[in-house]
């Protein structure tokens, strides 16, 4: 369905979140409002770290602005300057 962001991996015909697992990466999950959650095994000594990509306004037809946020990595700006640390 067009005009809204997908709410799951299934809606995009993607594998289940855990199917993306690798030694450093544990899951990639698409959730409500098109939020993409990346889960990491152990980066910078943090197990189950999370980085989220959050789409902007659904009314933009092209060039969707995305925000990158993490509650897990306080130093993220040093290695991903476009991301913002937002502690829970």
Image (cartoon, grey):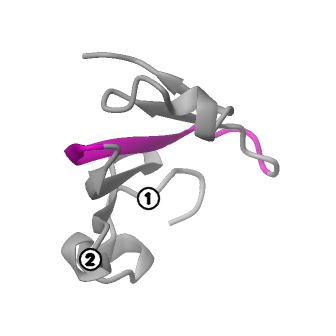
Query: How many numbered tags mark residues here?
Result: 2
Is 64 on the left or on the right of 19, as rendered? right
Please indicate whether residue 23 sits to the left or right of residue 61 in the image: left
In the rendered view, tell whether residue 4 sits above or below residue 87: below
Residue at 29%, 78% in the rendered image: 22
Question: Which is nearer the eye, 11 or 87?
Answer: 87
Q: Which mark is residue 21?
A: 2
Crowding at mark 1 (Cα within 10 Å: few <14, some 14-19, many 20+): some
- Residue, disc 1: 6
Q: In the image, is 74 to the left or to the right of 10?
A: right
When the figure is inspected, residue 19 is found, relative to residue 52, above or below; the finding is: below
Q: CA distance from mark 1 to mark 2?
A: 21 Å
Q: Position of residue 34 (x, y in %)?
A: 45, 50
Callout 1–callout 2 Cβ contact below 8 Å: no
The first of marks 1 and 2 along the sequence is 1
Query: What x and y, as percent, mark residue 45?
Result: 25, 44
**Residue furthest to the right:** 62
Magenta-drawn segment? 45-61
Quarter of the image for the C terminus: give it. Answer: top left
Q: Nearer the viewer, mark 1 or mark 2?
A: 2
Residue found at x 31% / y 67%: 24
Which residue: 24% across, 82% down?
A: 19
Element at badge 1?
loop
Mark 2 surroundings within 10 Å by alpha-carbon count, few (fewer than 14), some (14 through 19), many (20 or more): some
The percent coordinates of residue 76 (x first, y second) are 51, 32
């Amino acid at each position: 369905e067009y005009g809204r962001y997908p709410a799951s991996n299934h809606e995009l015909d993607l594998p289940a979140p855990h199917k993306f697992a690798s030694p450093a990466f544990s899951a990639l999950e698409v959730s409500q409002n098109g939020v993409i959650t990346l889960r990491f095994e152990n980066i910078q000594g943090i197990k189950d770290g999370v980085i989220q990509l959050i789409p902007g306004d659904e009314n933009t037809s092209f060039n969707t602005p995305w925000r990158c946020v993490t509650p897990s990595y306080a130093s993220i700006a040093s290695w991903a300057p476009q991301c913002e640390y937002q502690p829970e």
